[in-house]
Amino acid sequence: MTAGWQPRLLALDIDGTLLAWVEGEGQTYEKVSPAVYAAVHDALAAGTHIVLASGRSAHGMTRIADLLNLPEAASDRLWVVASNGAVIFRYAPVEIVHEETFDARAAVAEVLSHHPEALVAVEERGVGYRINRPFPAGELTGDMIESDIDHMVGEPVSRVIIRDPSATADDFVALAEKVGLHGTNYVVGWTAWMDLSPVGVSKASGLDYVAAELGVSAADVIAIGDGRNDLEMLRWAGRGVAMGQAVDEVKAAADAVTDTVYDDGVATELRLWFPT
């Protein structure tokens, strides 16, 4: 980075980046620390665009924007990259401006042939999720509509979640590498949680769309994240920053590693560019 450089766009993951993980629970506290809140607002005051980029669905992201008071503080409506890049919307109010869908039937059948008891969810946009059976408490947001899998993936969808509480993340990584999941992107989370999405769709592709709309190049972007679904985003951004608790694969993809989410790593990184 050249002397005096400041990012024109700041892309922020939510869970494990803005919000701290509840140890052993597979979910995060819905609370932004004062240090992170202040640092984000200093970036906003300096004219930097703030974009939330998450694997969460749209309805699970608006309340985080509200926690940060971004709709009120921004000079224009907020851009948000949801569902790992498959859905892009403006807020407030929610206005979907771009969505990518795919035929998930073959990929879902392949995964379920190895994990027949797995839980499956498909986003019901603006409402919640269609699920084959209930997920562990707190892992999904919105209304839960029980449905059969054939109905859930009978038409093109933007994203499918497959969850097996009896397996591990390593089990899912090995499975994805073994079967290939041709024609489908996949991301494995911290637990045995797999997101299936259209080929070529990621947080990076979503952010590239938003950056083009804002007239910003990737070289002028800082992206901060902690999960495997952040890999493409960290590589795409001019400065990709991994959270301190991220797995080694994520750290290796980043240009820098900041403090953990428990030590306000987002604030640590932002103070390099927006000092108090």
Image: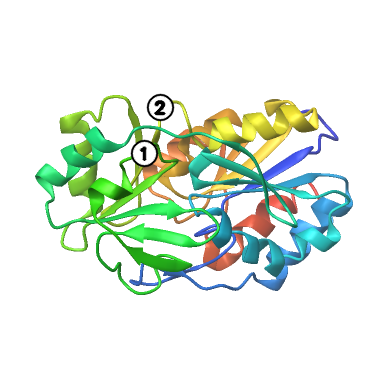
Which of the image's four quarters has the C terminus? bottom right
Q: Residue at x 73, y 25 (%)?
A: 217
Residue 136 badge: none
The residue at which mark 2 appears reads as 199
Q: Secondary structure at mark 1?
A: loop
Q: Residue at x 71, y 72 (%)?
A: 34
Name the spot of residue 41 as percent of width and height, x first: 80, 59
Give the mark nearer the N terminus: 1 vs 2: 1
The residue at which mark 1 appears reads as 155
* Residues at circles 1 and 2 in contact by the CB criterion of under 8 Å: no
- Let me know if residue 238 appears in the view: no
Q: Nearer the viewer, residue 124 or 211?
A: 124
Q: Secondary structure at mark 2?
A: loop
Q: Nearer the viewer, residue 107 or 34?
A: 107
Q: Nearer the viewer, residue 82 or 38?
A: 82
Residue 148: image quadrant is bottom left
Badge 2 amino acid: Val
Which of the image's four quarters has the N terminus? top right
Local crowd size for mark 1, using a 10 Å CA cut-off: few (<14), some (14–19), many (≥20):
few
Please name the colour scheme applied to the rendered image. Answer: rainbow
Local crowd size for mark 2, using a 10 Å CA cut-off: few (<14), some (14–19), many (≥20):
some
Q: In the image, is residue 24 above or below residue 220?
A: below
